[in-house]
Image: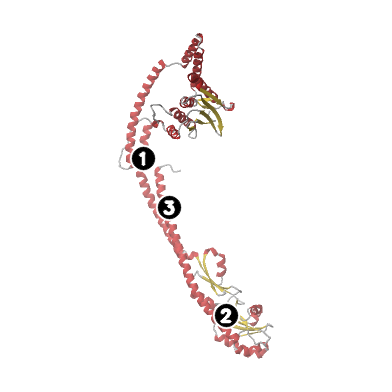
């Protein structure tokens, strides 16, 4: 793990250089590679198009000669000799040799009948007999046309067709021209882009194929490593391909040069980053040592400010902070001494809460001795109210105790409002033992009395409910007062959600909404933002207040 700023600067600076060169190198390599591949493909297409024209010209020339031989009167006159023996065929053989001599691209010429008897211009009849017999069916299938096929060896190709005879002639004969593959291979060499480019000529309908020995199979074995194109020449297809590794040679050379430049740049950047990091981190190290002295209580230490940059500003702020901390340190010590003196004085005047309870008990006894039961009951309720309110200094109380506290409060208010005030509590016993924040119901009930029951003529009723809702406990207070308008409700909600410093007191000097605000803020502080006070009211129909707290915070 890199912990020091100096190391981080070096790593970041070096990393930025590496990333920059890598991005530049890979982008440059990709752009150059795409450009070279595109140019290579265009060149291959252009040369392939020219090669197709030359191959087509050669094919048409061969087929023209073949047509002339098949339809010539000389062959028609000499054809019966094919069924003769020995010296009777000499005239036919002489005609065939003359045809070979007239066309330098013909290697050999063969004439075969259905019985498998062969006459050739050379001396290869027996070697080629099986091959020619196999091709008779093909010649019959394409009767009237010329067929191209691969030769009986790997160095030649064969062009053949059925000899056209008169209607009276019931015997069939087949003429075969053997052509050296060099005729096509020479054309390949004339239109070769570079040494890596290879060609293959293949028939679509039959087994005709001329390719450069050894490279046709490599084309399929290394398909992904080759850039290939394909063009149609009638029922032939010309395939051409190039080795991508040779095409991308210049791009790889550029990448190697960039790698060498990157290594040199890293060496230079390492030296620069070390100097730069040292210059930046030395003042920070001084500040660190100074702050360590502050931690030991030595606020007299000062940072020597040497620049006007951010680090210099930080040094000046650090010196100011040390002066302020030193002043605050002595001020806190004085205030602590003053606080201890005040605490000693407060202990002299401290009143024990039990004194208040004992006094109320004394008043209760005197009231009963004088026969004033109403005052005695009022004092008893007030004493119980105080006891539940203080609750021995605890912050959380059970729902039962909170309801008891509200009930004593309502009983005291009942003396004032008599029959005008009624209340009902509907809380399931299963919820009584949940612990909640204390003193959150009484302010809501007080609001219901003064802004609900008191504000209308006749009997006013306050109802208190409790229910569960998932992880929440809902405490609900409803009154049958006059309610409020929607605008007043909106303003009250706004005031209830204000911060303490923004809470103001308006409307005839009364603390309107203070009780709601106090309860809402305490609930949110104790339980979190989802909890709090929810208000709803309708003018002339009363107000409903819902306190949402968590069940499991006790």
| Residue that carries the numbered disc 2 in the rendered image | 179
Q: CA distance from mark 2 to mark 3?
A: 61 Å
Farthest residue, direction front: 457
The local secondary structure at tag 1 comes to: helix
Residue 407 appears at what percent x and percent y?
52, 22
| Residue that carries the numbered disc 1 in the rendered image | 284
The local secondary structure at tag 3 comes to: helix
Farthest residue, direction top: 369
From the viewer's side, name the closer residue of 513 and 96. 513
Q: Can residue 392 be seen at all in this image of the molecule?
A: no
Residue 545 appears at what percent x and percent y?
50, 30
For marks 2 and 3, the one nearer the N-term is 3
Residue 395 appears at what percent x and percent y?
49, 25
The label number, if any, that marks residue 19 in the structure image: 3
From the viewer's side, name the closer residue of 305 and 137. 137
Front: mark 1 or 2? 2
């Amino acid at each position: 793990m890199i912990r020091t700023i100096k190391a981080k600067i070096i790593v970041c600076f070096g990393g930025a250089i590496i990333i920059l060169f890598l991005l530049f190198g890979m982008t440059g390599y990709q752009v150059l590679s795409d450009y070279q591949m595109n140019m290579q493909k265009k060149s291959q297409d252009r040369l392939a198009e020219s090669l197709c024209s030359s191959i087509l010209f050669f094919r048409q020339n061969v087929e023209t000669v073949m047509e002339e031989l098949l339809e010539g009167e000389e062959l028609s006159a000499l054809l019966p000799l094919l069924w003769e023996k020995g010296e009777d065929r000499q005239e036919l053989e002489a005609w065939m040799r003359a045809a070979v001599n007239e066309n330098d691209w013909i290697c050999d010429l063969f004439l075969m009948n259905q019985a498998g008897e062969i006459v050739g211009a050379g001396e290869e009849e027996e070697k080629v007999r099986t091959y020619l017999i196999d091709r008779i069916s093909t010649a019959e299938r394409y009767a009237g046309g010329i067929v191209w096929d691969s030769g009986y060896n790997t160095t030649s190709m064969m062009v053949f067709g059925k000899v056209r005879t008169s209607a009276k002639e019931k015997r069939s004969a087949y003429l075969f021209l053997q052509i050296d593959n060099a005729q096509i291979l020479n054309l390949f060499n004339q239109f070769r882009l570079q040494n890596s480019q290879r060609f293959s000529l293949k028939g679509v309908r039959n087994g005709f194929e001329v390719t450069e020995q050894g490279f046709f199979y490599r084309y399929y074995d290394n398909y992904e490593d080759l850039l290939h194109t394909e063009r149609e020449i009638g029922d032939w297809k010309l395939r051409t391909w190039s080795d991508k590794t040779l095409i991308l040679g210049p791009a790889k050379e550029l990448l190697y040069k960039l790698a060498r430049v990157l290594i040199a740049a890293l060496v230079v950047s390492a030296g620069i980053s070390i100097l730069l990091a040292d210059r930046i981190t030395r003042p920070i190290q001084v500040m660190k040592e100074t702050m360590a002295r502050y931690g030991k209580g030595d606020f007299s230490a000062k940072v020597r400010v040497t620049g006007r940059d951010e680090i210099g500003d930080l040094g000046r702020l650090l010196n100011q902070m040390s002066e302020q901390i030193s002043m605050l340190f002595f001020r806190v010590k004085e205030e602590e001494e003053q606080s201890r003196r005040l605490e000693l004085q407060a202990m002299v005047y401290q009143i024990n809460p039990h004194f208040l309870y004992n006094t109320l008990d004394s008043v209760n006894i005197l009231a009963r001795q004088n026969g004033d039961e109403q005052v005695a009951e009022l004092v008893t309720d007030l004493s119980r109210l105080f006891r539940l309110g203080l609750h021995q200094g605890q912050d959380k109380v059970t729902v039962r105790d909170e309801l008891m506290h509200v009930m004593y409060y309502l009983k005291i208010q009942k003396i004032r409002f008599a029959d005008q005030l009624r209340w009902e509590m509907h809380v399931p016993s299963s919820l009584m033992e949940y612990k909640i924040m204390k003193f959150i119901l009484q302010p809501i009930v007080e609001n219901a009395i003064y802004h609900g029951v008191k504000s209308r003529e006749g009997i006013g009723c306050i109802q208190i409910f409790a229910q569960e809702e998932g992880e929440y406990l809902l405490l609900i207070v409803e009154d049958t007062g006059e309610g409020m308008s929607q605008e007043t409700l909106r303003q009250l909600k706004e005031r209830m959600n204000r911060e303490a410093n923004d809470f103001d007191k308006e409307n005839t000097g009364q603390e309107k909404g203070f009780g709601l605000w106090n309860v809402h803020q305490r609930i949110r502080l104790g339980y979190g933002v989802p909890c709090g006070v929810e208000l709803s009211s309708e003018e002339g129909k009363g107000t409903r207040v819902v306190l949402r707290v968590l069940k499991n915070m006790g």
